[in-house]
Each structure stands twice: as structure tokens, then as C-alpha cells.
Amino acid sequence: MKSKSAVITRSFLLLCVCLTIPFSLFAADFSGRLSSVVSYYQSFYNYDDSMPVYLYGMLNVKDITEEGLSFKSYARAADDVKNQQQKQSKLYYAYLEQKNIFGSVDFKLGRNYVFTPAGSPLVDGLELKYRPFRSFNVKLFGGGDVKLNDEYDEDDQVAGLEIYGDLASFSYSVAYLNKWDEKALTKDLAGLELSYNHQNLIRLYTDLQYNLLSENFSYALTGAGFYQPKWDITVEYLYSLPVFESTSIYSVFAVEEYEELFTRLRYKLDNGIYTYASFTNEYYDEYPDAYVYEIGINKIRTDKFQGYLTGVYRDDSGDENRVGIKSYMSYFFHRYAVTGIGLNYDVLEKSQDDADDTTYERVWVDVTSYLNKSINLEFKVERVASNLYDDYFTGTARINYSF
């Protein structure tokens, strides 16, 4: 029997095709993207072949009505040709949107991601925005709480409120969100987001989330950025404590706090070429603290070449350290042949005399071919190796059509 998520997603893809017929009778503006993906890989523990097949569909329709009603959607249908794994079809979002009703009201109706400092749920329902001033805006939302990796349950509900705005160089957002399972309150969260930008030279920001059920902070990010034409510095502090629904079995177990202090210096060598160095101090309750050093160079594509090279060293103050490199190079030989090669290599060093180091290696080659402005092909072959198990290969072929 097919799951509800699979039935909903495949019905939606069929509906998108059917909707193009009546919408085309009006002055609607269509755009979108279809992607067909075929993957292949072996399981490293039983060597069974798996061949997942995906169809991704994105459809945007503008100006359905003279008032500017639009429709936006994104979904995928999935299956495994070899019947080795259960691949879920998913409806990521699908909603009608209307802006500037009475000059200051917007709405979204359908399945939609809602982003607030208190949480970012995927909601089957309604989102309303009231924007009377730049300095004061209100957002209300509510409906079914969607979990993409679980079966859809109509008893799961979510609702929330956000007040936000900009005041010169200062922006703020205050939010509240709660979730319900039948009659039980499963999450009750409040959030605050503040940001200050001084002439794009200095940026200060903080993002806080408070769990009202357990009466403690569940997330905090505060940082500062300093920017000059040739260099920039970022300093951040992160605190995280997992939040489980009150009805989940995991809510009765103790969870571990995680803290992190991050610093990064980035320097512009030339147009599109950046080098950087970063230091991260990771703090744990039950495990040794770790110190992570990273240095690298990155070339974005401004002509025919792009790539990066990064070295990482992680010292966990215990029995295991990690040394690794990440590299990738891509060259635009022709629009039919944009070719790249990459390598990730890690060594987990163990200080015990009777323990061997663990190695992990990924090497891949990819090719992208632009047939025309609407269609391109992507191919990737990857070899994965470790001294813990035998080598295995993965492959992906993808065709993308934009309209």
C-alpha cells in the first residue's frame, strides 16, 4: 500500500500538469523546472545494488488574476528500481500567494515554509502578513504541521505570530510558535532576532530561541562581522540544546548541550579568489572539548576555472584527532563539457597503541553539458573507500529542463 505522502505528492504532480490547461487560457506567466534523476550505489555492508529514481518538479505561475495572484510549488516523486530502499515522494511546498491587498496585506494559502526566530515549520494552512510600515509588520500563520520524513497526521497542528521591522540600520523580529498533537501541547517556543548594520562595515547580530515548556534557552547565536574591501572577520558564539516534542519518547531522556566559539578571517587575493583561516572551539558536556583549525583557498567561477582547496585539523583533547583535506577543480572547456574532479580525504588518528588509524576517501568526477538555454545534463561518478570496509562506487545522472 502506498503511503499518504506518496499519494499526495503524485496527485500534486498530476494536478500541476492539469492546471496548466485552464491557466493557459488566461494571461498567466509560467516558469519552472523539471529534473529527472537516476542514482546508483552499493551498500557497503551487504553490497546490494540500489537504484533510486526521482522526478523533481517546480512550477511557478504568475498573474493568474488581474490582481496578481500567483501559484508556487515544488515536489518530487521517488522510487527504487531495485526495491532495496523505501524512497519517499515528497510535496515540499505548494501555495497560492497574493500580495498588496489593500496596499499592505499579503497571504499564502497551501503548504508553505514559514521562517521565524521561534521556529521554521512547514505548514499546511494560511500565512497572513500585515505591512503598514517599514518599522512594524505582523505575520500570523496556522494549520497542519507537516513532517517530510514521517507520515502525514492531520491531528498535528501549528500556529504562531511574528512581529518584525527595520529601523534605519537596525532590524528586529519577535516570534511565538506552538505545536499541538490532538489535545496535547507538544512545543511552545519564543524567539528573538536582532541585527545592526553600520554602513556595511560592521554587522552585529543575535538569534535566540526559548523553550517555554522546559523553561530554558534551546538556541542562541550571537556574532559580529567586520568588513573591508580586501578582508573581513567573523566572530560567533553558538549554543544549542535539542528540542523534542513533549509527546516523543526522546523528551524523557537527558540531552547534551553544545557550545561553539567560531572565528574566521577571509582575505581577497584577486577578483573571485579568496583565502581564509578559521578556528572553532567546540564545548561538550560528556565528551572532550575539541579545537578545529581550517585553512583554505576558494576560486569562484569568473572565467573558465573554479575550485577550492581546504585543510582541516581537529584536536578533541582525547584519544582521537582528525586530519583531512577537501579539494575540487572544475574547468569550462565548452558548454557541452564543464568537467570537474574532487577529493575528500580524512584520517582519524588514534593514540591507543593497539588501535589503527581510520581512513576515509571520496574521489569523484562530474560533467555538466548545457544543450541549450533550457536543457542541461549532469553526470557524476564517485568512488568511496575506507580501511573499515571495501571500496564501492556511486553514480548519478540528471537531466534538467527549465521553462
Image (cartoon, rainbow, N blue to C red):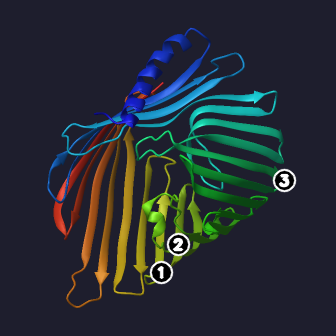
**What residue is at 76 percent from the left and 50 percent from the top?**
164
Task: Return the residue at label 1.
Answer: 291
Indicate which disc residue 167 carries: 3
Looking at the image, is mark 3 or mark 2 nearer the viewer? Answer: 3
Q: How far apart are marks 3 and 2 (CA)?
A: 34 Å
Give the x, y percent position of residue 65.
67, 16
Q: What residue type is labelled 3?
A: Leu
Q: Earlier in the sequence, mark 3 or mark 2?
A: 3
Pointer 3 with pointer 2, Cβ within 8 A = no
Quarter the N terminus occupies: top left
Q: Nearer the viewer, mark 2 or mark 1?
A: 1
First in residue order: circle 1 vs circle 3: 3
Between 87 and 124, the residue placed more toward the observer is 124
Q: Is mark 2 on a helix, strand or loop?
A: strand
User: In the rendered view, does 204 fall on the left or right side of 52?
Assistant: right
In this rendering, the answer to whether 304 lies above or below 346 is above
The reply to whether residue 233 is in sight is no
Q: Which residue is drawn at 44% across and 82% down?
A: 286
Q: Tag 1 or tag 2, which sits nearer the N-term?
A: 2
Q: Report the residue at 45% width, 70% height from top.
A: 253
* Marker disc for residue 277: 2
The amino acid sitting under disc 1 is: Tyr
